[in-house]
Amino acid sequence: MTTAPPPVLLRVSGLKTYFVTEQGKGTARAVDDVSFDLYPGETLGIVGESGCGKTVTSLSILRLVPEPPGHILPGSLIEFEGRNLLALPAPELRAVRGNQIAMIFQEPMTSLNPVFTVGDQIAEAAIIHQHLSRSAARARAIEMLQLVGIPDPAERVDHYPHQLSGGMRQRVMIAMALVCHPKVLIADEPTTALDVTIQAQILELLDRLQSELGMAVLLITHDLGVVAGHADRVVVMYAGRVVETASTDALFERPTHPYTEGLLGAVPRIDAPRTRLHAIPGQVPAATAWPTGCRFHPRCPYAWDKCAAEEPPLLETGTPGGGGHTARCWLVTEPERRVAKR
Amino acid sequence: MTLVEVRDLVKHYAGERRWFGLGRPRAPVRAVDGVSFEITSGKTLGLVGESGSGKTTVGRTMLRLQEPTSGTVLFEGNDVFGLDATRLRALRRRMQIVFQDPYSSLNPRMTVEETLREPLEIHGLKGAVSALLDEVGLDAAFAKRYPHELSGGQRQRVGIARALSVEPQFVVCDEPVSALDVSVQAQVLNLLADLQAKRRLTYLFIAHDLAVVRHIADDVAVMYLGKIVERAPAAEIYAQPRHPYARALLSAVPEPNPRATKRRIVLSGDIPSPAHPSSGCPFHPRCPHPKKSERCSTEAPALRPITPGHLAACHYAEEPM
């Protein structure tokens, strides 16, 4: 913990991705000034509920946000190995996308092309980026299928997506993403569409591949259980903002932002006796009309007048060994208010 | 007192014919294959399983939203499958359902008020929409809104209000919170628990998420490939699951605790198709039990009591894993 931090692999800084909505309903500020760093070999979890901006963040990194209606505002920075991806010309970006930074999506059903064999789809990236011959790429595809634990890979390589189960399709997606041995893997809700026993298989596979291939993983999920078991550090997002960052241990031991605290209380737990859950009142506001001040204050049990008036910056919580534990909450400056409420 | 009893319920879907309906039929899909349980009045049975286990089909068949292949469902001793249309309609008032997807289970062209009034009119009842809305935690102003103006959690509250409008005794909750975000999911679970206490409701709570079921169920039944493989009081099944599938399912739930040290049992392979169940125990191709033997692939284990009130369908349920 005390050694000098390794060089940042991927830096997201001041990222703002807005969407223009129809008929003047205003601009949806889906991602609004988001910053975080990803270090080589680590798993960084991005957690939040629907509409918090986590998926748009991941799409922005690879410039996959459809324009229009979306646009990434000037001043945003996505720096990969010292280059700003947002400023790269298209051909250079393509050399990074799918090659050094790869992505797996939530829906294995809709993310595969139904009219090509899985072998062709895995081989495509190897042919484009690594200039392999068709036969070499096919051999690589079989190798990748083996790596992700698909039985009879030499046979499966000629199968079409509809011939595979959901879990197998997600394995194929992972094989596609990893075929060029990327340095960064963005996994956007990689197990949400899967049954719990299949989810366990896929998460175990991702852990194994990460340690074998040494890549960094950006794990985007709504599931705090998945984060607890698989991330080294966590970024919690709410209403387009980062509201808390911490090492995984610190986040679960000392959740500081009331939203994080509320989320942890709301998760049904299998290890707890039957109790009433602590629900967070209200709902996530619309991205076209974030509340003033702290965006969580209308739902916050501790909020006072300052919270409605002025948005807090990300403040150091001072958790010992917390690994840069920060929270966007005025309670950090006035902790006695939390105690009073409890 | 037992309110609902299910005896040996079977639902097979006829296999489609090959070659655009001209060829040989495929094997029938054995969605529910001999399921029995009873639910005590005022209690909740959690019915748990993964995709394709048949849990939703059980719920829908019990209400006769689908006709069963065979079996019996008794509601207060009355045979639900033997009723004519008039008496079935009368019974429907007393057994209702809350659907999984609040986006597709509300009519987009009807306001909330129209949605809630329809069941009242069908059953010739008087009831105030505003009181119903209040009961599920929605402001009376919602009555004039259309579903697209509501969030997922609000829609699910409307779905619950619709089910409750005719004052049922028994409600099938079919994955009522799985489409919702965690913070909203907790609100809806708490609401269901409050309503149960207030109206003395009996629930069949269908879910794939064992952690969610833990917070609402008194008893839990675990389904795999159309069969119940384990059934026990909730506290017992979470403390000491007996069937290897139930053990694996419990161990696979990701816990929001980075220090959790439980041993994960990761099952290999996928759930087989219910059209081609294996011989013997349906779980044996994936079973990690160390005692697994020849017997498992030839002889289907019966659902039998392991301890009083705790049933499991495994030849080796008493053996540690």
Image (cartoon, rainbow, N blue to C red):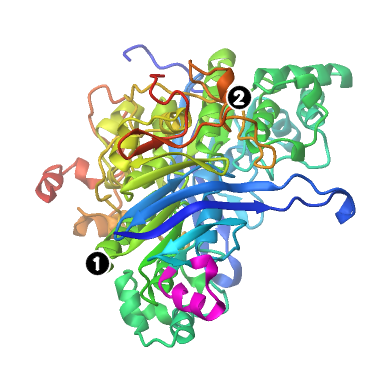
A12 or A177: nearer the viewer: A177
Identify which residue is drawn at 53% across, 53% down.
B9
Q: Give the main secondary structure of the magenta stretch.
A: helix
Quadrant housing residue A173 = top right
User: Which amino acid is tagged 2?
Assistant: Ser
Magenta segment: does it hold A42? no
Q: Nearer the viewer, residue B122 or A180?
A: B122
In the image, residue A296 sits, relative to residue A211, either above or below, namely: below
Residues B221 and A336: in front is: B221
Mark 2 highlights which residue? Answer: B297
Assess whether mark 1 and mark 2 are in contact (beta carbons under 8 angstroms): no
Indicate the position of residue B102 as horizontal and vertical percent values: 50, 63
Residue sitting at x 65%, y 43%:
A64
Q: Please indicate, yes or no, whether residue A230 appears anywhere in the rendered image.
A: yes
* Residue interval drawn in magenta: B80-95
Tag 1 residue: B198
Is B161 left, or right, of B115 in this rendering? Answer: left
Quadrant of the frame with the C terminus of chain B = top left
**Total residue callouts:** 2
For the N terminus of chain B, the quadrant is bottom left
Percent position of residue A200, x then y: 50, 29
The first of marks 2 and 1 along the sequence is 1
Q: Give the chain of mark 1.
A: B
Which of the two marks, 2 or 1, is nearer to us in this view?
2
